[in-house]
Each structure stands twice: as C-alpha cells, then as structure tokens.
Image (cartoon, helix red, strand yellow):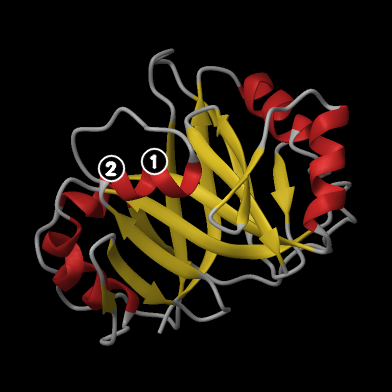
Amino acid sequence: MRKVARIALTAASRQDLVGAWTRLGFALDPGGNGVTLADGVALAFAATDDPARRAASVGLSAAPGAPPSLPVDEAAACFHLVEAFPAAPAPDHPNGALRLSEVAAIAPEPANHGEYLSALTGQREMLATSAGLEIRLDGGTSLQVLSPSAFAFRFGVTPQASGFRIAGLVFAVKNARQTEGVLVANKVMSIFQVGRLAAGDAEGVAVAFEQG
C-alpha cells in the first residue's frame, strides 16, 4: 500500500503560493519553495505559464516498480509515483500543523474512480458512502473522493471543476483553537464546520485543519 510523499501545488506565480501558505501559518522550507510536515509529506510550489491554471497533484511513494497496468481513468493526471527519499527535518509551524490527515478530490461520480484508485494505491478495501469514496493510505492519510455537494459541505467552498481533480487538503494540528488564532492574526477567514476549521481556498486548493 502506498503513502503520500509529495503534493505539487501549481499557480500563476510561486509568490502567490508563498503568500497564501504563509498566511495559513505554515513555516516555509529554506528558499521558500514549499512546506515540509513532521510526517515527511512535502508540499512543493511551482509556477505555470498559464495564469488561469491552479492545480494540485499527489506523489505516492512505494517500493520500486510501478503496477504493471492500471485501468484507464481521468484521475491519472492527478497522481504520480515518486521514489521515496528521507524527508528533510520539519520546522515548527506557527499554526501547529503536524501531518497531512486527508487529501480530498472532487468528482461528479466518485464511484467511477474506485477501480483505478484501488489499483494505484494497492488498497483493496475502501468505504463507499453517499458522500463518495474513502481510501486509507499508509502513513495515516485518508484519500477522499467527494461529490461536489459533499465537498462544499466539508470545506465551505465549491471548486469549479467538471471532472476529477485534487481540490482539498486537511492537516492535523496540535490545537485547533490556537490555529484559529493564527489565522485571525493573519486576516484569513475561517469557520468551524463538520468538526474541522475550514480556511477557504489557497490558490486553487481548499484547506482545513482538525485536532490532531
């Protein structure tokens, strides 16, 4: 079974990403190219020539050797396999972030992607609900594939998407109320919703925090 190793975040400008994630209370890596969490997950910032394109993709680490074949699926553009390297030491984040607890994708028909995601992640067991699909990955991260209405309910924002895409990230924090204080100080609007602190959209990706 695979685990999340890297999240690539793309926006029109790397500085847009730096500003957005700094306001959310994350300490940036040296050089300001991303964020490292204590669980070894890295967020990497990249710019794009297309100012309208803001996207995220997930790098899954695994033992050498990709699956011999995978079902055809539009979700494939959102995932890639990466070689696992020792993670850089993680700083103390002002928002108290400890680890990545959830990656949320949005899809009009979540169940349509179950076969592909099972083959990709190596996880045969998944939970199907009225909201979508849930797959538990190594490292304790949950991969959720949600319908647009379920995503809006959980994150408080409705992304514009006609197909499958990575649209939300949830981070476990030491103290959610202290995290809320950091967001208030940085003038980031947030609201407690469905047991988590939803902090809106950060350059195309909805962000939320929950008690770790």
The answer to whether one can see residue 32 in this image is no
Indicate the quadrant containing the C terminus: top left, top right, bottom left or bottom right: bottom right
Tell me: 73 left or right of 106.
left
Q: In this view, does 185 lie above or below 51?
A: below
Q: Mark 1 points at which residue?
A: 152
Does residue 5 appear to the left or right of 113 in the view shown?
right
Vertical arrangement, residue 190 with respect to residue 52, above or below: below
Query: Which of 175 and 142 lies nearest the eye of the viewer?
Result: 175
The image position of residue 134, as x and y in percent, is: 35, 71
Identify which amino acid the numbered label 1 is placed on.
Answer: Ala
Q: Which amino acid does label 2 sit on?
A: Pro
Look at 49% across and 37% down and name the residue there. 205
Q: What element carries label 2?
A: helix
Which residue lies under the disc numbered 2? 148
Residue at 90 percent of width and 56 percent of height: 92
Image: 114 above or below 12: below
What numbered label is drawn on residue 120?
A: none
- Quadrant including the N terminus: bottom left
Where residue 98 appears, as percent x and y from the top left, is 76, 64
Count of picture labels: 2
